[in-house]
Amino acid sequence: MTTPTVNILALETSCDETSAAVVRNGRQVVSNVTSTQEAIHRRYGGIVPEVASREHLLTVVPVVEEAVEQAGGWEEISAIATVHGPGLAGSLLVGVNVCKALALARDLPLIGINHLEGHVYANWVIDRSTSQDQPPPEFPLLALIVSGGHSELVLMRDHGNYELVGQTRDDAAGEAFDKTARLLGLGYPGGPAIQKAAEAAAEQNDIVLPRAWLPGSDDFSFSGLKTAVLRLMSGQSDADASWIAAVAAEFQRSVVDVLVTKTVQAAQRLRVRSVALAGGVAANRPLREGLREALAIPFYCPPFWLCTDNAAMSASAAYYHFLQRDFASGDLDVQPGLRLAA
Amino acid sequence: MLLAIDTSTHYASVALHDRSALLGEHTWLARQDHTRTLLPNVKRLLQDAGCGLANLSAVAIALGPGSFNGLRVGLSTAKGLAIARGIPLVGASTLELIGREYGWQQATMSAGRGRAYRLRLSDGETPSDPASNIELIDGQVPDRVRHAGILAELGWKLLDAGRILDVARIEPMYVQPPHITESARKRHMLPSPQDAGAAGAPALELTEAGATRAGSPST
Ligand SMILES: [Zn+2]
């Protein structure tokens, strides 16, 4: 028996990326078109919600039309998936309302996707840049989701089954990168800026920043780290480039140490068969390398082009909803604070 | 078959018109709930008229001014319908719709903070560039219910006149640019006030005249 071909069109407008993609049978990217507003928001040092929302409404049509055209037209589409949270209300509503209209007008099922679920499923998407055989991750799986708004450890026993293991008690990992980069005058977005500065740092230096281990818990805490950086800075009168680089390197080591150690401990205790990294901070090289070295079980991390927000990951996640016939109705609403697991 | 959509304010309305007659119209108090309530109302309208989306030949949209998010819900839906069926999109200023329904002396709507928008028309005809004819004046005006049947009728005229909108580029009539102030922080990505002081960059907040801000995102 052959599996019927299922092409899902997904649209993602939760933050500052307008992205549409068509993914076949949950893993094969047919098209993936993304328009980023990063240059617009950079001058504000962060995302301005009203500006983001206005931009989505201007870019959504060409992005969707391009993704559908590359997939061979509307007749090829089996279902429409929309990311309905978490994210910015004014941004989410553009994608959700366009998708509801598409589903109605093409008489196709509608699927509501959690943005974080999408990030996790970036690990199912087949990376076209490698010729290697890429088997899907095996359950039970522990996912470390790290982004500008999230730092969570989530246990997945099967598709669509999410159990919260640990989460940040204050700042998200990506938020810590952004704030620290700003303190160090390294610019926005903070993740790539800090990684770049750290690469230029000398091997040896005497800068030490704290690690919040929170013994007995799988939770994280990063706000103390930011305060420690602030304290270091106020005690340093001549903060030259090499000193800044050393602080950036130690900051990054501290975040990576904590994320890697706590993820490995939780994976061992929960006896999972694989670990997956997800979210924007998954693009951080020391974090990817640190987890790969520390884990004795299969480790997955998305290729760089799937770490930032994109619709391919959401279309992949939607396939497993499609197989369960888990469809949304016309009254689907945006949920800015939508959670993945409790 | 033409579908008209108006989600400019707390009041929302949809109508279906076959060029010779109004087939149906639903008007409701949407408050801030446009995303949740719009599509079920469109579906019900089509069902009641025994009409499928395949019969749809055009969409008409109220372009504002009004609530930024309300306008975007309507226009996002209209854009989705237009590209999925390959049909034309036409639109009119919400002030023009109020003028046609309540009389041209009444072509006003609240802009918040004790101010109002007014559309000045010389002869009651659809202006070629309504946005440039909108004035901001002092005074309180009521939030008027608009019936989308009026937009539907106008929609056919705009269609016949060839005044088709560019589905990709059309935006609501925001009238007011996004207002960026140096007040409270709006989003986690932005620094807290003490960080801002240290980094020397202002935190940002957007305010929207005449509309209640939706809850701030938790992500
Ligand atoms: Zn994301």
Image: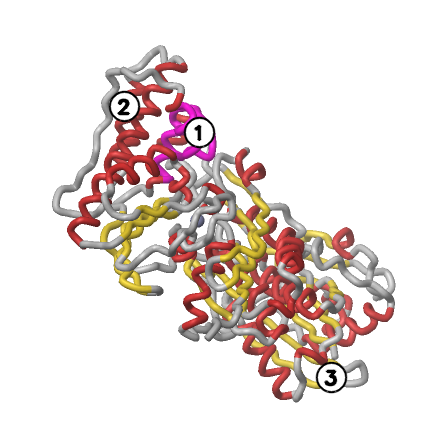
Q: Residue furthest top?
A: A238
Give the vertical position of A236 relative to A43 (above or below).
above
Where residue A152 appears, x then y in whole percent? Answer: 29, 49
Q: Chain of mark 1?
A: A
In the rendered view, does B59 fall on the left or right side of A157?
A: right
Where residue A180 appears, x then y in whole percent? Answer: 36, 30
Cα–Cα gap, marks 1 and 2: 21 Å
In the rendered view, does A101 fall on the left or right side of B32?
A: right
Label 2 with label 3: CB-CB less than 8 Å: no
Residues behind callouts 2 and 3 on a single chain:
no
Residue placed under numbered mark 3 in the picture: B22
Identified at 77% across, 67% down, the residue is B104
Q: Which residues are magenta?
A: A174-197
Q: Which mark is residue A239?
A: none
Residue placed under numbered mark 1 in the picture: A193
Cα–Cα gap, marks 2 and 3: 69 Å
Label 1, residues with CA under 10 Å away: few <14, some 14-19, many ≥20: some
Q: Which SS class for mark 1?
A: helix
Residue A185 sits inside the magenta stretch: yes
Identified at 22% across, 47% down, the residue is A219
Q: Which SS class for mark 2?
A: helix
Give the vertical position of B16 relative to B10 (above or below).
below
Residue B103 sits inside the magenta stretch: no
